[in-house]
Image: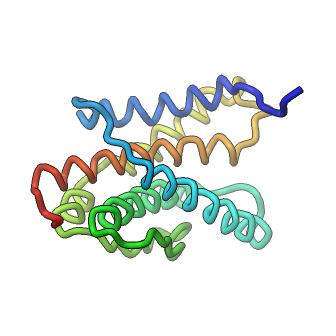
Amino acid sequence: MSDFVTSVPAQAVARCIIETARSLNMLDQPIAVSDELANAEKALIVKMFQHMDEHIKKHGEELQPDEISSLFTFVFAKAAEAVTNMFNHKEQTFDLTGMFDGRIPLYADDSVTAEFKSSRFPFLCAENYLQFTEDFAGDIAGCDPLLLLFEALKWCFRLSCHLAIVVVENHNSIS
């Protein structure tokens, strides 16, 4: 017997993030994907889980809304960096500075940075995620809250990578 289970709440929270992207017209074309970005996502999420563990040991298990908002902004910025690194054939490394405090450095292509600084996507992801957890508190009771949050963050990263690729392709800015 496998330890694998399906999670309706995880699927619902993923849909919440996807609908957020749809509301901003980010999904009016097929989602851009790549093996390199999938591997970058995995590496980032593992590092974030480790950092989250340290944070919980110091500050307790309950995250504040500002910390959750910072997490969405953080993965948004890291997606911009991952796409820039991919196009520049650079190694994917992730600095965890700003993960919880919102002071997140952004090292990405200029056109991607400009687009990302004006985007409301991470803010709306955080807002919609928090609303989701409030509206469906009964349905998600018993779910590991960190796994649910990281499912949302994973989809934020994926869709942010898609946005960054679209920006690069539209501006033909990275050689």
Position of residue 73 measured from the top left corner of the image (x, y, whole percent)? 42, 58
Side (left or right) of 165 relative to 125: left
Side (left or right) of 173 relative to 106: left
Position of residue 121 measured from the top left corner of the image (x, y, whole percent)? 34, 47
In the displayed structure, 163 sits above or below 71; it is above
Residue at (46% x, 38% y) in the render: 128
In the displayed structure, 19 sits above or below 107; it is above
Q: Nearer the viewer, residue 31 or 157?
A: 31
**Where on the picture, by quarter, is residue 79?**
bottom left
**Where on the picture, by quarter, is residue 1?**
top right
**Where on the picture, by quarter, is residue 59?**
bottom right
Q: Residue furthest left?
A: 171
In the displayed structure, 108 sits above or below 169; it is below
Residue at (10% x, 56% y) in the render: 171
Side (left or right) of 130 relative to 10: left
Residue at (33% x, 68% y) in the render: 89
Q: Nearer the viewer, residue 56 or 45?
A: 45
Side (left or right) of 11 relative to 2: left
Position of residue 65 measured from the top left corner of the image (x, y, whole percent)? 56, 54
Residue at (70% x, 65% y) in the render: 50
Quadrant where the C terminus sits is bottom left
